[in-house]
Image (tube, helix red, strand yellow):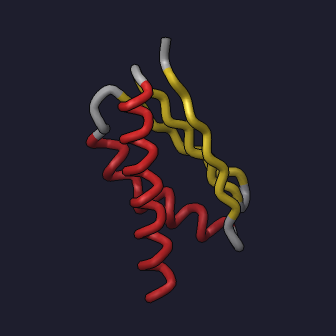
Amino acid sequence: MTKKATFLFCFPSSKDASVVAQSLSPEIKHKIPKSMVTFSINEKKLTMVIEAEDLSSLRAACNSYLRWIQTALSVKQLV
């Protein structure tokens, strides 16, 4: 049975949502073991769904992606 977590991020503009999603695309290509991540953008909203084989893998993937999103937003504020 797979475990699943869904995150919804609301941004000030659709461009901001797109920039964050694009900054994470290299991470999605490399894939975290035992997990699958999908992103979708709908106007100003970015939805991230993480599925994993077990709870510890889900937690690890969530921590990684949430940290990468936080980093992308921090860099965006500096630029």
Whether 67 is drawn above or below 8: the answer is: below
Q: Residue at x 41, y 49 (%)?
A: 63
Q: Is residue 18 left or right of residue 79?
A: right
Q: Is residue 71 left or right of residue 11?
A: left
Number of residue marks: 0
Q: Position of residue 44 (x, y in %)?
A: 71, 62
Dividing the picture into quadrants, the one containing residue 37 is: top left
Q: Residue at x 41, y 62 (%)?
A: 23
Q: Position of residue 59 (x, y in %)?
A: 43, 38
Q: Quadrant of the C terminus?
A: bottom left
Whether 42 is drawn above or below 78: the answer is: above
Looking at the image, the residue that sits furthest to the bottom is 78
Looking at the image, the residue that sits furthest to the front is 56
Dividing the picture into quadrants, the one containing residue 53 is: top left
Q: Residue at x 73, y 58 (%)?
A: 43
Q: Is residue 59 left or right of residue 26?
A: right
Q: Position of residue 78 (x, y in %)?
A: 45, 88
